[in-house]
Each structure stands twice: as structure tokens, then as C-alpha cells.
Image: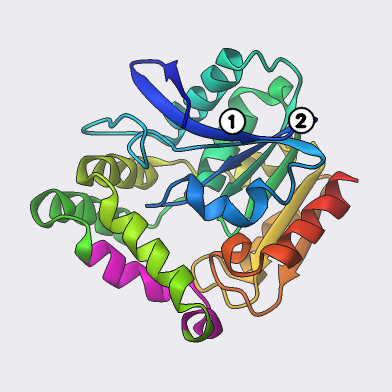
Amino acid sequence: MPTAKVHEIDLHYVERGRGTPLLLVHGFPLDYTMWQGQLDALADQYRVIAPDLRGFGQSGVTAGLATMQLMADDLVQLLDRLAIKEPVVLCGLSMGGYVAWQFGLRYRERLAKLILCDTRAVGDTPETAANRIGLAERVLKEGPSFVAETMLPKLFAPATIDSKARCVEATRQVILRTNPKGIAAASRGMAQRPDVTPWLSRFDMPALVLCGQHDAISTPSEMRGFAEQMPQARFVEIAAAGHMAPLEKPTEVNAAIREFLG
């Protein structure tokens, strides 16, 4: 994988195809491989770029705190290193969606269209934020095994767990390989992220809001609700998918993305 120096770290990324830049931003605690169903499939029309966020995959690690704002800044520096000046399509899943919100708020001129997959607009409750801080402390002591065991049942729809064991196991291995310092820093960052609900009307670019039918983390009703508050958003529910809709149902997700991008 190529790397780009952004701020003080090396950011790894993969790139496929030519055309309008399509930036794919992974969730927590994963890496670019969660977009395996999109990288090649969409490269016939788009310049698809999928980075490993700081602390994940093969990118450099930040100890302490990695905020969603900092990760958005990283993405802008990556685009600069790649000499991409035109506005991009940004697609973020879960934590990648939190980064996408910050990208849109801080760099509106760099954003042509927005795709939000299985993510939330609201900030954490005090209890959820405390749980994220607790996870950060525990993963530094114990490693990521418990993270994989607790998160996997929440990431995938029951049908996916039953029928796509290799996919689920590959995701488990990604989590187990992730640096505990990266997991901890991002978990603290998510706990601090702002509630973007008051600012939804500022996201006036064309937007696609995708949600798995069985997503228990960011539910279809919640995502439909914030899509209705965005001036140019459309909501699409992906049947039989959970929180990892692009990985679970790549054909359906890719069709929705193609239709949206026209």
C-alpha cells in the first residue's frame, strides 16, 4: 500500500480507477478492507480511495486521543498529497460517518456529495461516553480480543453471521491485528465528538443515507430521522443487512451508490 505523510504520521491508503474521487472512510475498529466490495466494483467510474485512518490498519498510531476533527484534517491532507483539488464524494461508515460530519463542517468547499452509512448524528450519552473511556483503558491493558468478541455480534445481521462465516472471521482478524493504542485513542475521540443534529441543515450538498435493515447501533428509524433534516438527503434501507451494510450486501449498496451518483 502507498503512504502519504499527513501531520506527524504516515497514512496508508489504496486507490483504484479514474474519475470523480470517491473517498471511503472505514468504521471502528477496522481498516480499509471493509470496503473490499466497493474498491474494484466502483473503480470503473470513480477514483476510489480508501485510507486506513490514523491508529488503524497500516497507518501510524496516535497515543492518547484521536478526535474526529483530527481524522477529518488527515483526510484533507491526504487529498492534498494526492493533488486532488476538486470536491470529492465522501462515504463514511459508523466512525467514518462521524469523521464525514466533521469534514463537511470544516471543509464544505472540498465536498461535492456525502454518503453516510450506518452512522449517527447525535453525540454520545454520558453513559456511552463513559463506556468508550472504559474500553480505551481496558484495551491498553488486555489487548483487542475482548473488543472483537463484544462487537462482532453487533456489527453483523444474524443472517450474515450464519451465512458468511468467512467474512465475519476476516473482520475478527482485522480487529485482533489493530494496535490497542489506536483503538484507545479513537474510542476517546468518539466519546468527545459533538452532537451534529443542530447543524444538519448546513449539510446542503446532495446526500445519501444508507442503513442496514437490522442495524441495532444506528437504527433505520434514527437514520431516516436525521436524513429528513438534511436539505438534499435521500434515505435507503438495505434489506437483510446489519451495521456493516457495505460488507454484508455489497451489490445492493453499490447499486444505491451508483444510482445516487448518477
User: In the drawing, does residue 238 fall left or right of residue 95?
Assistant: right
Q: Nearer the viewer, mark 2 or mark 1?
A: 2
- Which disc, if any, is residue 4? none
Name the spot of residue 259 as percent of width and height, x first: 87, 54
**Bounds of the magenta segment:** 146-161
Snapshot quadrant of residue 125: bottom left
Residue designated by label 2:
18
Q: Residue at x 27, y 39 (%)?
A: 185
The amino acid on which the numbered mark 2 sits, given as a three-letter code, is Arg
Q: Nearer the viewer, residue 55 or 107?
A: 55
The amino acid on which the numbered mark 1 sits, given as a three-letter code, is Phe
Name the spot of residue 239 as percent of width and height, x first: 70, 77
The correct choice, above or below, for 259 with respect to 158 in the image is above
Residue designated by label 1:
103
The correct choice, above or below, for 209 with respect to 72 in the image is below
Snapshot quadrant of residue 211: bottom right
